[in-house]
Amino acid sequence: QVQLVESGGGLVQAGGSLRLSCTASGSIFTINAMGWYRQAPGKQREWVVDITSGGGTNYADSVKGRFTISRDNAKNTVYLQMNSLKPEDTAVYYCNANAVSGHYWGQGTQVTVSS
């Protein structure tokens, strides 16, 4: 089992920045990759970015060049630095862990970008 706790959401004006954090606990040695998804009102949850255990990263085209994922292995924490935020980035952001035993999700953190 893997537990994920997110933090760092909030309200920001367009063009601003936010940093999300996701700390994993439990069977962290079974995690193959971690990432972020988001769900806007009335829309399906969509993949945003992930980072593999080897450090490889993948970004959705909609956030490439604006968002950066990183990790601190000593703290079992993954970060999502979001710059040049747009109103269309408004969503609940969910941390995800892809582990041997399955996918795990955080509780979600709200990001609201005002125009």
Image (cartoon, rainbow, N blue to C red):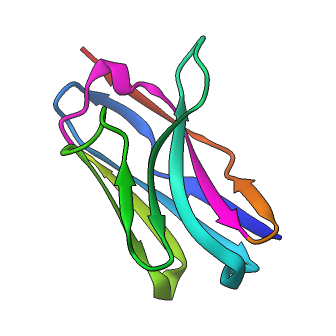
Q: Quadrant of residue 72 in the image?
A: bottom left
Q: Is residue 25 left or right of 63 when viewed as pictured?
A: right
Q: In the rendering, at what x and y percent does residue 82 appear?
A: 29, 45
Q: Quadrant of the N terminus?
A: bottom right
| Residue 66 sits inside the magenta stretch | no
Magenta stretch: give its range: 83-99
Would you place residue 69 above or below residue 88 in this image?
below
Q: In the rendering, at what x and y percent does residue 34 appear?
A: 55, 63
Q: In the rendering, at what x and y percent does residue 26 appear?
A: 76, 78
Q: Quadrant of residue 5 in the image?
A: bottom right
Q: Residue at x 38, y 55 (%)?
A: 58
| Residue 95 sits inside the magenta stretch | yes
Q: Is residue 69 left or right of 40 when viewed as pictured?
A: left
Q: Residue at x 74, y 65 (%)?
A: 3
Would you place residue 98 above or below residue 72 in this image?
above
Q: Is residue 2 left or right of 41 when viewed as pictured?
A: right
Would you place residue 29 above or below residue 56 in this image?
below
Q: Residue at x 51, y 49 (%)?
A: 36
Residue at the limit of the structure toward the bottom, as seen here: 74
Q: Quadrant of the C terminus?
A: top left
Q: Residue at x 35, y 20 (%)?
A: 88
Q: Nearer the viewer, residue 81 or 52?
A: 52
Q: In the rendering, at what x and y percent does residue 48 appear?
A: 44, 42
Q: What is the number of callouts on the image?
A: 0
